[in-house]
Amino acid sequence: MSQFSASVEAREKLSPHLVRLTLSVDQGFTSTGVLDEWVGLVVPGQFQSRYYTVRSYAGSELVLDVVLHDVGLVTEWVVRDDCVGSTVTVSEPKGSYALPEGARWQLLVGDLTGLPAMARIAEASGLPTRIWAEVPDVLPSYLPASAEATWLESPADGSSRLAEVVESIDWPPGEGYFWMAGESAQMRAIRKHLMRERRLPATAYDVMGYWRSSTGRQPRAVDPGPIWREGKAEGLSDEQIWARYDEARS
């Protein structure tokens, strides 16, 4: 998979749980044009990719909207003062949105992680669009006015009501397309509903697990962030920083 270097040009806090990053990406990066495309993002102090939907791409400007969690390497990095000006790595984009021929409408359902894709789809597809968004912060200006949106407040206990929402949808007549993204276990249950109860053909829907629920995160034995920053300040290579990190963990 191809990777590209990018610099963080700007950061904007859209809500307490959503931050927008504007990146300037190296030449060679090309959008797929698929409306829910995503890229892998590797930030300083992190050696693994985390995946984010491309909110928009024009010229060399790549916009990603990052969901803030209680803990997490990207969350810890994106709120730091030195986030802007950082050099990051992004992977070549991939997408799965595939509107079937003859579709007359589309239904989009998701939590905060799916919101950027739903906004981009609604803006660009040109079809009558109905959206259900389960989010901790209402962002009425985030979605285009052309879409009919229902905002659902995320339950405080971290659960979700999206499965109930899908089961209660009054489906429009004729051929259409259903797109949904959210917590993986819930997405599996909704796929079963669409297949067994709605009896939709596979081309009529796309349901993706964007994240996995967990009862808790195991604390890192060694925080790689300080090791990364110290190593870079000393002019060490990534390989040398890796070796120092492995030694600290042993």
Image (spheres, grey):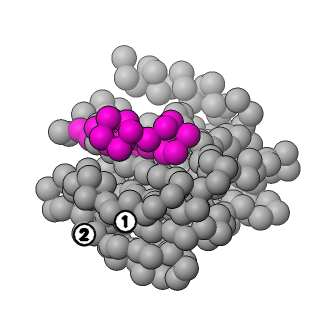
Instruction: Give left or right: position of 175 versus 93.
Output: left
Per the image, the residue denoted by label 1 is: 132
Identify which amino acid the numbered label 1 is placed on. Trp
The residue located at (44%, 37%) in the rendering is 224
Q: Is residue 212 visible?
A: no
Identify which amino acid the numbered label 2 is placed on. Glu
Q: Give the camera-side residue of 215 and 168.
A: 168
Per the image, the residue denoted by label 2 is: 153
Instruction: Please determine whether, in this image, residue 167 is positioned above or below residue 49.
Output: below
Instruction: Give left or right: position of 241 versus 93.
Output: left
Compare marks 1 and 2 and give the one earlier in the sequence: 1
Give the percent coordinates (x, y) of residue 223. Answer: 38, 38
Magenta residues span: 187-214
The residue located at (46%, 21%) in the rendering is 246
The quarter of the picture where the C terminus appears is top left
Q: Give the camera-side residue of 158 and 239.
A: 158
The quarter of the picture where the N terminus appears is top right
Q: Quadrant of residue 91?
A: top right
Q: Is residue 136 magenta?
A: no
The residue located at (18%, 62%) in the rendering is 155
Q: Quadrant of residue 132?
A: bottom left
The residue located at (24%, 63%) in the rendering is 154
